[in-house]
Each structure stands twice: as structure tokens, then as C-alpha cells.
Image (cartoon, helix red, strand yellow):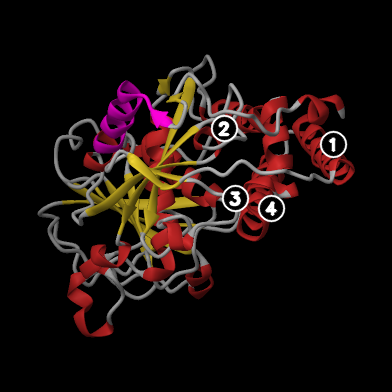
Amino acid sequence: MSNIVTKLRIYNKTLDPSLWNKKTLKPEVREALLKVAEDFYNSTDLNGDIHNVLFLGSSANYNWTPTSDIDVHIVIDIAAEKINEEYARKFMDGLAFKWNTEHDIEVKGHPVEVYLQDIREPNSTPQQARPGASIYSLYEGKWLLAPNPQNIKLDSDKIRKKFQLIKRKIDTLIKTEDVERLKSLMKSIRNYRNTGLAKGGEFSVENIVFKALRHSGDLKKMKDTINNIYDRKLSLPEEGHVLAYKKTKPLNEQLGKPFLVVGVITDDLNVKSAVDYTGNSMDHVKMTNTWDVLKDIRWRYKSKTNTIYWMPHESEPTTSQREEVIAHLRSKYKVINPRETFDAGKYAFDAHTIDEFINEIVDDCGGISNLFFFAKKV
């Protein structure tokens, strides 16, 4: 197990020759990466200017391996998009995650990962670079911060012990198939790495441990385990009955019409929702008050934009809650690949413009409860 660390190539004398001619990026590589960046940005609804497209990470440095990702960062001014600052990072990560999940792109044998990066974040400019980082501008076709050959001193014993500790945790949770704890561990590993990058840069203990876990295949095993359990949960048995949630009526005659879904998800991942079609009159329908449900996460899905709107005044939903709502929409309303936003716009809570939003809380019977249900045409 510890041999993985000793076999991991930490540093090279040259840049990856499959991508670089000495320190010059191969023209076909630059062209391919710019095309990926353009296609990704055009797949979003972002309207602001692209300030730069950067090539970062180990594939642009001397610590590359044959399996290193190519990290393409599209630098934008997120403030210009008028997105709530509190959710900006989550919003950008969501767009990149969706693209990277749906596309399997390789350039010269290296997987390509795209990211959105705010101009105020580390590594957006040479002045904001992390220790040991290198920055290549795909836009300008030149180094903004060239890689610097270094005499690296690593604490091999500390790296090995931390690698073994995390690997044991991964192996244990994979055997138990505890999805929530696996997701939590994956998040903590990424946070651990990011902390190391911020403090010590590319050659920090945390970043080397992360690379060792990726090189050993442990991170992939975690991701595959989570996805396999999720797929099994959504699969139909041979007799064709839906296992999850509750029985629903067919929506065949309504699927072609614009519709709005309002719903909640609880801490224990129980999803409840109700649908309204354009033109229906559902104003001021008074139902029973279920005050306890106010603690649940409220959301809205609009078919016209294929978007889930998370209520900005609510607690932020967990990854599991987001996934369950997406699965619920797919199962019950045949929704495919919805966008997500925490910017509810005119639907945000405002007591003075109550006719411009839906105050939605759904009771255990699937009906609308808690004060009133307001609907406007979508």
C-alpha cells in the first residue's frame, strides 16, 4: 500500500513532452483546449466577458504524471452576473460539474477538466498565484507565470502515513456502502487538498497525498461506488413498480405544456411536490398550516427554462438533497438535466411583492399547505 507513494513521480526535469515543445505549448493542444473552453461557456447562460482562459495545474508544471488532468480555467467577473455572492462559488462549481460529468474529453491522453474562476480568486493572475504555481494563458498563447525548476524537499514519512490513513477510511466506507459518509469524505479530501494548495502550493503534503490517492485509483473507486449505489436506487425492478417516493398519476396529456413544480425536501431526503400548468387558477387557496415543515428546503422547477430555483432565503441544500430533487423530477415529471440556480430573481421571498413568487410548502399528502399557494403564469 505504501509503495503507491514511493512509485508516484513527484517531479520531472521537463514539461510533459506530449503537450509541450520544451516550454512552448503545441499549437494543436492550444486550439483543442480553446475549443473546449468556448463550447463549455456557450453551454451556460452567462453573459459577461471572458477575461482569460488559463491552463493551470500539474500538466502545466514539472510535477506532471502520465495521468494528470489538464485544468482549463475560464476567468470571469462573477459580480457582473448579478449572482448572490454567498452562492457564487457553488453556482460556478455546479456549471463546471455538470459539463465535466456529461463530457469525457481527452487531449493527448490527458482528461480535460473545465472550471469557472472569478477574477478575484487565487491563480487568476500572476499577482494572485499560489506558491509553486504556473499559469499559461491559452488566450494569449504565452506564460503569465512560467514554471520554476525547484529543489523539492518532501516529508515522505508524513505523506505516507496520511495516505494510508485516508485509504483505510475509503476502503472501510466502500465496504459498508455508506453513501453519505463517502460523499462527506470525498468533500473533506478536496478541502484538505485546497488547504494545502493555499498554504504550501503544488508541493504541499496535502496536494501530494491527493495525487497519490488519485494515482492509486482510490478516488475513482469512491466516485464509482457512489454512482453505482445511486443508479441502483433509481432503477426499476422487473415488475415495473417504482420503489421510491409514492405512486403518481400519469402526466402524458400534460407533458407538452409549460408547467411549474413547487416542492420541499427534508433532512432525511423525503421529497414532496405539486405541479401547476400555465393558465390554471390557483390563487389564494387556503390549506392547513404545518409550521414544522418550514424548516425544510423549498425549491421550484420551471419547465420553460428547465431550471431548479433554490430559495435564497433558505439553508443551502446538501449535495444529497440536490441529487434527490433531480431524481424526483426525473422520475415524476420526466425532467432531464435541469439547470440549478440560487438566484431566484423575481420569485425570491419579498412580502411586498407576494404575487410574484410561490410560497410553497407541501404537506405529507402532496397537497399545498401553510398559509396560501400563489401562482403566476410561467
Give whichever of discs 3 and 2 has the lower sequence position. 3
Image quadrant in which you'd find residue 214: top right
The x, y position of residue 48, in whole percent, is 20, 57
Q: Nearer the viewer, residue 180 or 67?
A: 67
Residues packed near mark 3 inside 10 Å, few (<14), some (14 to 19) or many (20 plus): some
Image quadrant in which you'd find residue 222: top right
Residue at mark 1: 168
Residue at mark 4: 192
Image quadrant in which you'd find residue 348: bottom left
Cα gap from disc 4 to disc 3, whole angstroms: 18 Å
Cα gap from disc 1 to disc 2, whole angstroms: 23 Å
Position of the N terminus, as image quadrant, is top right
Cα gap from disc 3 to disc 1, whole angstroms: 30 Å
354 is within the stretch colored magenta: no
Give whichever of discs 2 and 4 has the lower sequence position. 4
Point out the stretch of residues depicted in magenta.
Answer: 24-38
The x, y position of residue 132, in whole percent, is 59, 50
Query: Magenta part mainly helix, strand or loop?
Result: helix
Residue at mark 3: 132
Q: Secondary structure at mark 4?
A: helix
Between marks 4 and 1 in the image, the one whose residue lies nearer the viewer:
4
The residue type indicated by label 4 comes to Tyr
> Furthest residue to the top?
238
Give whichever of discs 4 and 3 has the lower sequence position. 3
Residues packed near mark 4 inside 10 Å, few (<14), some (14 to 19) or many (20 plus): some
Q: Secondary structure at mark 3?
A: loop
Q: Is residue 171 visible?
A: yes
- Residue 230: numbered disc: 2
Give whichever of discs 3 and 1 has the lower sequence position. 3
Q: Nearer the viewer, residue 181 or 288?
A: 181
